[in-house]
Image (cartoon, grey):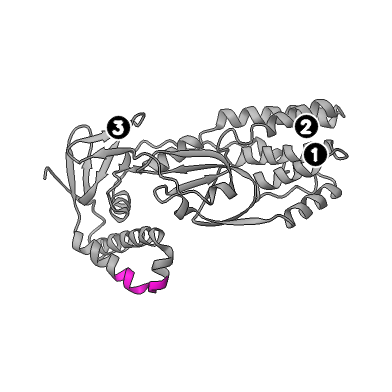
Amino acid sequence: MSFFMSFILLVTLPSYSMPVLLKAPQTPSEEFFAYVQTEDIVPYSKAQLEEIQEQSTDVQELTVLLEQAQKSFLKGHLNQAGDYFRTITQRAYEKDWVEEAQKIIFYSFLRLAQIEWKGLSVEALLHSASIYAPHLQPETRLFPPPLIQKFQSIKKNQSKISLSLKQIFPFHETILINGRVFSNKIQLPYGEYRVTALSSSHKKWSRVISLSQLVQKRVVTVPLVSGSCRQAVFSKGVNKHQVLFQDFCVWNENAQVRASYPETEIQKNVEDLENTLPQKDLKKWGAFALVAIGVVAVVLITTKKSSGNDSKKPPKIKKGF
């Protein structure tokens, strides 16, 4: 299948029917991950990500524009084609686009550079393409060799910057850069990017910003919820979902319940894992290491619970305090 034809294949993501869970700021990450792993519930950050990626209508609009641009280009109506391609590229930082839209925008930057090959903006357009989608490469069947060679030369000579996302976003667990989800340590070319940070405990943060500015920031947004397990207080604009407070206390609109996990077992597994890691690595990782410890602790707990002849059972819930 050609690179161009793959653009029109749209992906529709499933909708969650499960309840959504917020994390109170004071709730330890290992408790949150333990609860999410053992209950049929979706972290708020994951629900936000799914909502962001529901773009079928918007991607279809880009696909129609691309088809019109390509028809004009093949007929030799280059001015008209250029207008269509330019309209697409101007929407590059409009939202956190999914992969299909990223390919359309990347292709449009390249085709616009081909149309304006002898103009002054060619290098700027190729640079924009490489910044917008560093993971994509031009399709050799669709573009002339001189354009591909110039693109590769620009990409090869780009200066890059290293970022530690956990230091910049200590309370946000999902970071999108130009629509792609990145882990903690990344290295990208200098330039402007659309950056969106999602959290189950703090409000979303989204900006179009240069990486040289981003690296100097430590982003802390307003907590989604405050108060206590008896009386949760939601920030303005936040829908009422279930909330996990400390000690596995779950708030919802109908009641407050406390999940009865063997806390000594959780602590033991966390301590055992900490003892297996070199101290210098723990210091280096900081908060990221603690989250990882919490995740592995969950695996250890659930594995231990499911051993023997008994099938996996949900955690016990007792009402009240």
**Circle 2 sits on which residue?**
70
User: From what the image shows, is residue 187 above or below residue 40?
Assistant: below
Estimate the x, y position of residue 66 in percent, counting from the top left: 71, 31
Numbered disc in front, either 2 or 1: 1
Query: Residue 158 colored magenta?
Result: no
> Can you say which quadrant of the picture contains the C terminus?
top left
Whichever of labels 1 and 3 marks the residue nearer the N terminus, that label is 1
* Residue placed under numbered mark 3 in the picture: 240
Residue highlighted by disc 1? 121
Residue 266, located in which quarter of the rendered image?
bottom left
Query: Where is residue 185 drawn, in percent x and y?
Result: 52, 58
Q: SS at mark 1? A: loop
Q: Nearer the viewer, residue 284 or 114?
A: 284
Type of residue at label 3? Lys
User: Label 1 is placed on what type of residue?
Assistant: Ser
The residue drawn where x is 83% and y is 27% is 79
The correct choice, above or below, for 90 with respect to 284 in the image is above
Span shown in magenta: 272-280
Dot 1 crowding, Cα within 10 Å, few <14, some 14–19, many 20+: few
> Disc 2 residue type?
Gln
